[in-house]
Image (cartoon, grey):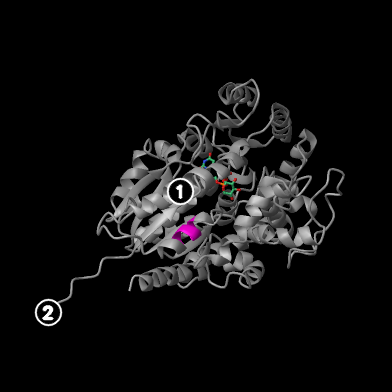
Amino acid sequence: MEQEPKAPPHVLIFPLPAQGHVNSMLKLAELLALAGLHLTFLNSDYIHDRLVRHTDILARFAGFPGFQFKTISDGLPPDLPRDGEHFMELFSALKSVTKPLFREMLISGQLDSLSTGGSATCMIVDGILSFPIDVGNDLGIPVIHFRTISACSFWAYFSVPDMIEAGELPIRGNEDMDRLISKVPGMENFLRCRDLPSFCRVRNMTDQNLQLVADETRQSPRAHALILNTFEDLEGPVLSHIRTQCPKIYTIGPLHALLKKKLGSRKSPMQSQSSNSLFEVDRSCMEWLDAQPSKSVIYVSFGSITTMTEDEFTELRHGLIASKKRFLWVIRPETVTGEHGGGQIAAELVKLTKGTGYVVGWAPQEEVLAHPAIGGFLTHSGWNSTLESIVAGVPMICWPYFADQQTNSRFVSEVWKLGMDMKDVCDRVTVEKMVNELMMERREEIMKSAVEMARLARKSVNEGGSSYCNFDRLIGDIRLMSK
Ligand code: UDX
């Protein structure tokens, strides 16, 4: 008798509910769906309410057989902004409110496969959340961690307990921030106090933020495997250190480039673009860019959750205008804290620049970075932005805001030589100087590394490249789990 064909594996995907994380997890989900897996994508209600306004994203995923979105509470009141200021509140609400709900949903079958009604073959969960490992262990579902940050910052977080034991942490109020850190293996020669993830900047070790992130990071070895959005040619040395703790690692980045590659090899040209932006994209900047000379524009964007004071905004604005370089600046309505809203600030800024500056509330960033008019990127060093800039071969000025960004920016400037680090400084003179160095004086030198790293990034996602092969290996391993 002929056997029934076996249903594809069903993977439950659970990101931390924040734009940067959901963005990468959706990309991973799309890659898995293209490989024929059936998926349940679990969003917080808050994130999903924003996602449903983007019918293009919903339509794209609806086209995949066996794909469904499900939602869960993140435990916070609906009107509380989910920005950097409230990051820790989100974190503790997830543990106290979301964890029991998650277990309940799994047990009651609410997260079962749309196509077969069976439970998940495995879960791929945000590597900053360890509670799904406990739930998965109880219910016999393997959990793969997916950490959306760089390998270098993951390793710095992982080393926090050793730094505490050696007395290198906490960073005290009167600390010499340029002191070298010795307890992050492989980074002894260049990692300074100020380059540690921002959560290390605390007065005492009872600080909840640091403890939380360090504790969660130390849980990753308990997961079945670890997926990282990076590539071997970029972070090989630090990956070899991580492998001593988490032997099963899949480096499959840059994810956006791998996805583009996989979509590009499909028939329909309509499918070669894939954006997961939860903000309203203002495409008018593309037309403005079309009218600018080659490599003349510096793109300024600080991601989805960075906020800044009015003073910081004023210094950036004066510095940019004084540099006399054209710029495209993303100012989200809530970017600048204080009395003035982003809309008013943007309108005033555009008037001031007399056409050499352009402001939008949210840009199609990947397309912007790939535009020939873009010559540099003033960024907060969020990991997605960093990878997008690397792939586009655009050099960076880094002004990190928080978390992993402090470490990313050190690697961009000191290790990869892809730009300059403006961390902990925000004055008009420095901004003007750095913009001019990046766009003119140091351009040739930095572009050499930028062009080479862009080549290596593309190589990693091409057929036979490390990320391309690792992704196939991941799919193979998930298929084996369902046997
Ligand atoms: C957060 C953290 O801040 C970051 O450090 C961590 O690595 C991931 O989660 P976020 O601050 O939003 O993310 O920064 P980033 O990782 O750079 O992600 C921002 C994403 O939004 C990028 O994919 C970028 O292309 C997109 N974006 C940003 C737009 O599409 N348009 C914009 O105008 C700005």
Tally the numbered discs: 2
- Mark 2 Cα shell of 10 Å, populated few (<14), some (14-19), many (≥20): few
Residue 362 painted magenta = no
Could you tell me how far apart the alpha carbons at marks 1 and 2 are, in whole angstroms? 45 Å
Q: Is residue 33 above or below residue 310?
A: below
Secondary structure at numbered mark 2? loop
Toward the viewer: 38 or 220? Answer: 220
Toward the viewer: 196 or 165? Answer: 165
Q: Are marks 1 and 2 in contact (CB under 8 Å)?
A: no
Dot in front, 1 or 2: 1
Q: Earlier in the sequence, mark 1 or mark 2?
A: 2
Three-letter amino acid code at the position of disc 2: Met
Q: Position of residue 341 (x, y in %)?
A: 59, 23
Toward the viewer: 93 or 163? Answer: 93
Please report the residue visible at 21 percent of the width from the left and 70 percent of the height from the top. Answer: 5
Three-letter amino acid code at the position of disc 1: Pro
Residue extending furthest toward the bottom: 1
Q: Quadrant of the N terminus?
A: bottom left
Q: Is residue 123 left or right of residue 408?
A: left
**Circle 2 is placed at which residue position?**
1
Q: Quadrant of the C terminus?
A: bottom left
**Circle 1 is placed at which residue position?**
100
Secondary structure at numbered mark 1? helix
Q: Is residue 103 left or right of residue 369?
A: left
Q: Main secondary structure of the magenta part?
A: helix
Instruction: Write the start and end of the magenta stretch as one range.
Output: 132-136
Q: Is residue 142 above or below residue 406?
A: below
